[in-house]
């Protein structure tokens, strides 16, 4: 069970959450599961990010594993938004132990140790769906750029709405405003399906390419209730989740399994892309049955993904 307290940190009031095991903020945000994070400080023994979760602009820092520092949010926002998003109630040490107990692969054990700070974020299903459609045949920097552009086109500037006196990212002079923030998008809310459906042409400046028609079909199906995200979440069924998501134009196994894992918390989901195929061929002799890893196979997938990215030094 995590603990929280109010504290003055780095000259500012913060809500400090501790007791999170080995949770590593950098590894969690930058492991490829989410795309709306901005690194604002990286010093010896300290990192800090800004991210938008729903209607909440979150500044979060870390000075030690298993501890998070939340700046500028209320207790209500911590409980309603940050607590589920950062999986503060989930024991990832127990999950890692479960994964390790199911394998005799020394390589996977090393991966689990290297990536022991990763937590699966509980993202909004619609945001996850839209983002992973964008991810097709794309690398992480470009995905993040397109997502920022989409948010700028459709979203609301939370920095301006909150009346902040300065940019939380330190990118510009003066108070945030529509004019000042016109080229950024980092502090904007995520596009709503209904808004995308009503004005799809506003997607075009972000250059989504062939994904445009897929994004539009996803927006149409979600806005009209043909793809009922609330019902999918209610069912808590991995098979049902995959089946419903794959009815959307352009959504195949890989995108559906990513959304199942990161948007619907189906932790048994094991997305297989070119990275996973290469890892399985190289380090598991071409044979790895995700089902053998149990109900946390998706967490094991993140261990593998993180480890192989670090080994190969690639940011794709």
Image (tube, helix red, strand yellow):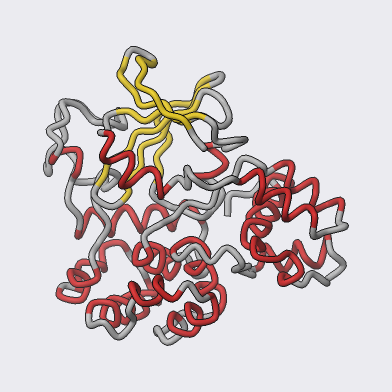
Relative vertical location of residue 25 with respect to residue 4 in this rendering, above or below: below
Relative vertical location of residue 273 with respect to residue 115 in this rendering, above or below: below
Residue lying at the far front of the rendered structure = 1
Q: Position of residue 75 (x, y in %)?
A: 28, 34
Q: Nearer the viewer, residue 140 or 7?
A: 7
Looking at the image, residue 248 sits to the left or right of residue 243; the answer is: left
Looking at the image, residue 103 sits to the left or right of residue 180; the answer is: right
Q: Position of residue 263 (x, y in %)?
A: 44, 63
Looking at the image, residue 160 sits to the left or right of residue 192; the answer is: left
Q: Nearer the viewer, residue 186 or 138?
A: 186
Residue at (47%, 51%) from the top-left corner? 121
Residue at (35%, 42%) from the top-left corner? 51
Relative vertical location of residue 237 with respect to residue 132 in this rendering, above or below: below
Q: Nearer the viewer, residue 159 or 66?
A: 66
Residue at (40%, 70%) from the top-left corner? 233
Looking at the image, residue 316 sits to the left or right of residue 149; the answer is: right
Q: Nearer the viewer, residue 145 or 157?
A: 157
Q: Position of residue 177 (x, y in %)?
A: 12, 39
Which quarter shows the C terminus?
Answer: bottom right
- The mark tally for this picture is 0
Residue at (41%, 57%) from the top-left corner? 123
Q: Position of residue 192 (x, y in %)?
A: 23, 65
């Amino acid at each position: 069970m995590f603990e929280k307290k109010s504290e003055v940190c780095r000259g500012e009031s913060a809500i400090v959450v501790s007791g999170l095991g080995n949770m590593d903020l950098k590894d969690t945000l930058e492991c490829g599961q989410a795309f709306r994070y901005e690194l604002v400080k990286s010093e010896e023994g300290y990192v800090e990010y800004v991210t938008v979760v729903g209607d909440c602009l979150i500044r979060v820092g870390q000075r030690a594993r298993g501890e998070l520092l939340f700046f500028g949010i209320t207790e209500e926002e911590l409980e309603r938004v940050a607590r589920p998003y950062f999986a503060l109630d989930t024991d990832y040490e127990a999950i890692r132990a479960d994964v390790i107990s199911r394998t005799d692969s020394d390589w996977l054990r090393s991966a689990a140790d290297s990536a022991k700070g990763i937590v699966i974020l509980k993202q909004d299903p619609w945001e996850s769906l839209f983002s992973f459609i964008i991810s097709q045949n794309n690398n992480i920097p470009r995905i993040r750029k397109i997502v920022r552009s989409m948010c700028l086109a459709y979203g609301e500037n939370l920095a301006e709405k909150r009346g902040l006196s300065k940019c939380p990212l330190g990118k510009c002079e003066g108070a945030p405003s529509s004019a000042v923030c016109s080229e950024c998008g980092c502090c904007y809310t995520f596009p709503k399906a209904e808004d995308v459906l009503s004005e799809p042409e506003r997607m075009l400046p972000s250059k989504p390419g062939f994904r445009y028609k897929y994004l539009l079909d996803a927006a149409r199906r979600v806005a009209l209730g043909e793809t009922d995200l609330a019902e999918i979440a209610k069912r808590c069924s991995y098979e049902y989740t995959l089946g419903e998501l794959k009815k959307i134009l352009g959504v195949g196994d890989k995108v559906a399994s990513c959304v199942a894992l990161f948007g619907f918390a189906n932790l048994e989901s094991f997305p297989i892309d070119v990275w996973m195929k290469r890892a399985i061929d190289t380090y598991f002799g071409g044979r790895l049955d995700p089902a053998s890893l149990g109900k946390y196979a998706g967490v094991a997938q993140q261990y593998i993904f993180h480890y192989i990215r670090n080994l190969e030094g690639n940011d794709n």
